[in-house]
Each structure stands twice: as C-alpha cells, then as structure tokens.
Amino acid sequence: MDAPAAFRQQLLAAIPRLRRYARSLMLDAHAADDLVQTTLERALAHWHQFDQRRDLVVWLIGIAHHAHLDELRRNARLTVVDPAQAQAHADARSFDPGPDLGLRVDLVAALRRLPLEQREPLLLVAVEQLSYAECATVLHLPVGTVMSRISRGRVALRALLEGQGREAKAARTLRRVI
Amino acid sequence: MNTPDDNKLSAWLDGELDAQEAAQVEAWLGERPEAAARVREWAADRDALRARFDPVLNERSPQRLTKAVLESGSRLARPWALAAAMAGVFVLGGAVGALVAWQAAHTDPAALAQQAPVPWVQRAAVAHSVYVPEVRHPVEVNVADRTAPDVRAQEEHLARWLTRRLDVPVKLFDLREHGYELVGGRLLPDVAGPSAQLMYQRAGGGERVTVYLRKPDSGPEADAPAAFHYARRGELGLFYWVEGAAGYALVGALPRDKLLALAEAIHRQGSAVEVPALR
C-alpha cells in the first residue's frame, strides 16, 4: 500500500532537520542531500513500520545512519566521481561560504578528522539535541557507550581545534578531477 | 563528592544527570575554575556546531527531495507496477528514448558536461570507436589465436614494448574472470607523446572494450589518491582515473555497473604489480 498523504506531509516537514543532520555528518551539501533522498525513499518504502507514538525525526535519523553505513561499506574499495558531480561539489563549496568563514573552516576541518564513531553521537546530541537514550536507539549502542563516545569526542574535537593552525590545510584535498 | 570524570561532566552539560547528581557536579565545578573553564569550552564548541549547521534549517528543501516524497517511492516499489511501467517504455520504444535524450540535452547541463570529459579521455573514446569495429586489424600486436606458450611470449613482448615506448609501466590486465580475453594492443599518438590501447573481447566473439593508457601530464596530481570518474558519450561508457605513473581510461558500450566491475579489476591489478621498464 502506498504511504498515506498524512505520512508524506510529516516527511516533508522533517526534511529540514534531516538535511541538517546529513550536512553535519557528510560535511558536503551534495552528498548530504543524496543521503537525505535515500533516507526518504527508504522511509516511504517502510512507512508502515513507523510507530506514530515515536519521534519521526529520530526514526528518520536512524534510517539515515544505516544508509550512510551501507554507503561507506559500498565505497570502501573505491571512490567513484562523475565529472559533472565533482564540478557541482566544487561550485557548491565556492558559493556557500557559511555564516562565519574563519570559524567554519576550523570547525569543519576538525569535524572531518574526528572518528565517525565519536563524531556521530556528538552531533546527534549537540546539534540535533537528541537525548542519550534516543542517540543509543539510533546508533544501536548501549547508553553508557554513547555517553563515553560523546565525552571522548568533545575532548578530541577540542584538541583538534587547539592544535589545528598548522595542519588544517593537509586535510583539505580528498578528491581531484583529472 | 568524588572527582567526576569526563563522562559525567559531559553528561552534565547535556542535561543527562538527575537533579541530585547535577547539583553535586555544579557544586564541584564551583570550586574548580580550571575544570569549569574546560566545560565552558565544550559548551562553546557545542554552540559553534549548532551555529554552523542550524542555517541548513532555513534553506529551501531541494525540489528533488520534495518530489521524492510526493511523487515517487512506494508506487514503483511494487514489482508488478514496475514491470508494467517498463513494458510501457518498451512499447513506446524509440519515441520515449528520443524524448529522454532531448530532455537530457536541453534541460540538464550536467548531461552535456558529461559528454565532454577531459581531452585525453575524448581521445581514448575516439581510439575505441576507430579500432573496435576492425575485423582484420583491430590491434597491432595480436596475442589471441595462438598456442599457450606463444601467447605468453607475445604478451611479454607487448608489455615490454609498450612500457618502453610510453615510459609508463604497462601491465596486461587479466579480465578472464569477467569473461574478457585480451586481443592485443597498439601504440597511439597522444598530444605530448605515445599512448597505448589494449583491446579485450568477450569470449566467443562478443563485444570489445579497450583500455587507454598514457603518461599523465605532469602536475601535482601525480601523488594524489586515485579517484574513478565516469562519463558517457552516446552508447559508450568511460571510466577513467590516474594512479601512480599512468592515466587509465576504460571504454566500452556497457552498462555502468558492468564497466565499473572491469575498471575495478584493472585498478586492482594495476596497483598490484608493475612490469619494470626494460631497455
């Protein structure tokens, strides 16, 4: 059965928050929206599994988390880049300086270098303002693990931000167009 | 109270402690200005993260996402509906194909950009189109249709010859696992010097794919990590990348996933073994 119109409306309303989470996870607007699209498609295909008593955004973030892991596994061997896509990436970057350039570069560069297992719970709690319990549900981890990864993430992020001036540039170029 | 560890301080910042524990942590922090300063930094980082990503909330949702919710999704997920839709496509046939091509060409600049990849990849595509239809002289050095020891000797000759002329380690990739036999290779003119083309054919006289090899233009790219790029020119699909001392372009009239499997095999073999240049 097709997803009912009411569910689709709920999904539409959730897109901005889903995009924020995906952006903070991927640190790239285009890749983030790809992840959001995959998430929405999966949500539509499994809409009947959603318990209306739960928070839809938390449910969607859980789907996005798994979709991202799937993608990491798929891409573990190789990076595939369409030239047009790569160009679009470059354009998106150059046209979106963000609210505070200096702050953004440092913060994003530091985030990029934070291990995913610390970055994700930290973002879920700090930016998405999920509770530790919600975060544990999304990541399929015990609450205690979530708590320690968040605190380790905070310590590591601070260290990266403080020691960064010298190395910030080294982390920049991950892909190139031939 | 006992000294609270980072977990507890961090949980306090996130409002995860019950009232009694929170009060204890606050009292403890009140007497430890250094620890309090540290927690304030964490709070500042948290605020900076929010400030960085909150603006996304005010962006307009891209059309493709709202469309994904409102239009696509579960309707086509039903197998019979998908089959029916595909049958419709076949019935309409060329008309639909032409329309899609027309739309792609007129509405999607990305599609146009894909038709014009970098110049040397263009040359790889042209070389493919020129030699693949050849019946009698598809390659300069033929390694197929020989007895086993002969094949080996001829392969060795081809690899050494191309390696010497290109000044790039040329490896003859083994694609038999994917059903492709090496036909042979030839030397080609590139802009600044020679390049090479290796031709493979699907066992039993099937379709041919070519691998174009060249020494990359000098530049900072030489020690950058490999990235696969994909392009289509009409029927032809191209995967191209630069790794180590060589630029590679795989060309074939194959669907993207099949071509990618071959490209991955070539990439694996190319980075695994190098034939030393023998002069």
Image: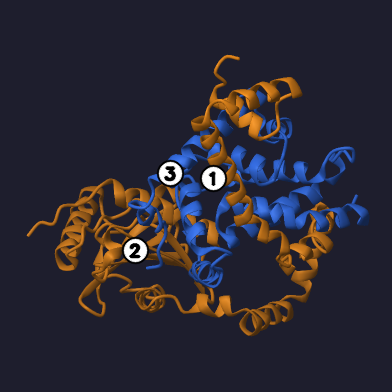
Sort mark 1 into few (<14), some (14-19) or many (20+) by Cα contacts within 10 Å.
few
Residue A149 placement: quadrant: top right
Query: Which tint was used for chain B?
Result: orange
Label 3 and label 2 in one chain: no
Residue B141, picture quadrant: bottom left
Q: Tell me, what hue is chain A? A: blue
- Image coordinates of residue B269 in percent, x first then y, are 33, 49
Callout 3: residue from which chain?
A: A
Q: Which mark is residue B248?
A: 2
Image depth: mark 1 or mark 2 in front:
1
Q: Amino acid at mark 1?
A: Leu
The mark that comes first in sequence, 1 or 3, is 1
Name the amino acid type tagged 2: Tyr
Q: Which mark is residue A160?
A: 3
The amino acid on which the numbered mark 3 sits, given as a three-letter code, is Leu
Q: Is residue B33 left or right of residue B118?
A: right
Q: Nearer the viewer, residue B7 or B85?
A: B7
Q: Which mark is residue A72?
A: 1
